[in-house]
Amino acid sequence: MILSISLWLLVAVLILWILLDPVSRISRAIFEVLIPLVNQKPIDLKNKFGEWAVVTGSTDGIGKAYAKELANRGFNLVLISRNAERLEKTKSEMLTISPNIQIKLISADFSKGRDVSVEIEPHLRDIPVGILVNNVGKQYTYPMYVGEVPEDELWDIINVNIGAATLMTRIVIPGMQKRQKGAIVNVSSGSELQPLPLMTVYAATKVYLRSFSEALRVEYNKFGITVQHLTPLFVNTKMNAFSHRLQVSTVAVPDATTYAKNAVATLGKIDSSTGYWAHGIQAFFTLIPPVWIRTKIGEMMNQTFRKDYLKQKNL
Ligand SMILES: NC(=O)c1ccc[n+]([C@@H]2O[C@H](COP(=O)([O-])OP(=O)(O)OC[C@H]3O[C@@H](n4cnc5c(N)ncnc54)[C@H](OP(=O)(O)O)[C@@H]3O)[C@@H](O)[C@H]2O)c1
């Protein structure tokens, strides 16, 4: 009798243990889709975090749209990108939306690695940064095998996707800690949900961002600092120019403005999110199969995008 009960208990524990991981992943995805519906009250981000926001990679795509959303909410902005002319143009657009905010421009190329943070630090020394959006990112020109990716492109991806977020955080976090408030938003990518063949290095850099965000949150939560980890799936921006399929805005592949509006609304409410309800639903289904199946599906998807690109270029 005791033996049979123990055996059944053992089987039950085993089943629970096997189910624990998928169940926790799936419940996280459901929570993420439901929270914006249940909790629609907007948060006063300026009051919660501070009046200045820094956005990296802010002259195009998600970064520009995110900065616009913050301008709408009256944040003073520090915009960082490579191209001075595009920065000035972006500044004018922001001032049209919100004429009374202050905007500071920093022209810097994060692919240069450590030297860039040395350049940027003095510009931010006297600014009480409330929100840092580590948005800048670099993707392959098109899906490639690792051996095909030019060495410079690989270093650029590592410097831009990993180096920039790490060092920008290192610059602003002591000030936030002193003021006992602030938010770091790390823009990762759905590519971190499983290994992603043909975008191998890009996806691996985004896994770094997830680990970085989760550990940073534990380190700095007690100082009143929010660390949000965003994992957008496909957004219609120039980053995905390798395939015509991703250059059409739909519910599943939103434009950057739609994405940013939704993502900003999650800040202060949820620490880890795709940032957009339809991406939450996609992530939910993505996370159901075991990782090896998802990796295989990812490879098949990227083979299609690779063919799209090669056809576009007549190669
Ligand atoms: N689009 C998607 O489907 C998608 C999906 C998941 C995650 N994400 C992530 O979202 C973030 C934004 O992507 P996006 O699609 O909006 O990109 P995007 O449209 O290509 O815009 C990139 C922005 O970063 C700036 N930038 C690029 N390289 C830079 C460098 N070396 N130094 C400084 N600034 C640089 C660009 O401006 P300048 O050229 O003027 O410097 C531009 O403002 C990235 O981290 C990306 O990985 C995107």
Image (cartoon, rainbow, N blue to C red):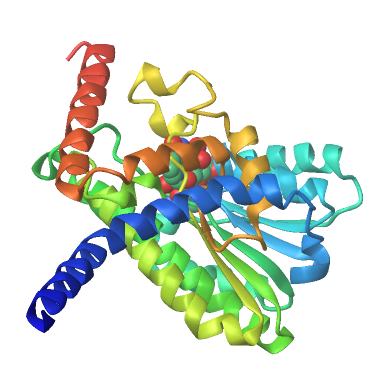
Above or below residue 108? Residue 284 is above
Q: Does residue 56 appear to the left or right of 2 in the view shown?
A: right
The foreground one among 151 and 13 is 13
- Residue 169 visible (yes or no): yes
The residue sitting at 73% across, 45% down in the picture is 69
Number of labels in the image equals 0
The foreground one among 290 and 49 is 290
Q: Position of residue 292 (x, y in %)?
A: 14, 46
- Residue 264 visible (yes or no): no
Q: Does residue 59 appear to the left or right of 137 in the view shown?
A: right
Above or below residue 250? Residue 71 is below
Tell which residue pokes out farthest to the front in this image: 1
The foreground one among 29 and 223 is 29
Q: Quadrant of residue 23?
A: bottom left
The foreground one among 268 and 315 is 268
Q: Position of residue 259 (x, y in %)?
A: 59, 38
Q: Position of residue 72 (x, y in %)?
A: 81, 45
Q: Does residue 16 appear to the left or right of 240 in the view shown?
A: left
Q: Quadrant of residue 62?
A: top right
The N terminus - image quarter: bottom left
The residue sitting at 69% across, 49% down in the picture is 38
Q: Does residue 203 appear to the left or right of 247 in the view shown?
A: left
Above or below residue 163? Residue 302 is above
The residue sitting at 33% across, 40% down in the picture is 286
Tell which residue pokes out farthest to the right in this image: 100
The residue sitting at 54% across, 25% down in the picture is 251
The C terminus - image quarter: top left
Q: Position of residue 150 (x, y in %)?
A: 18, 43
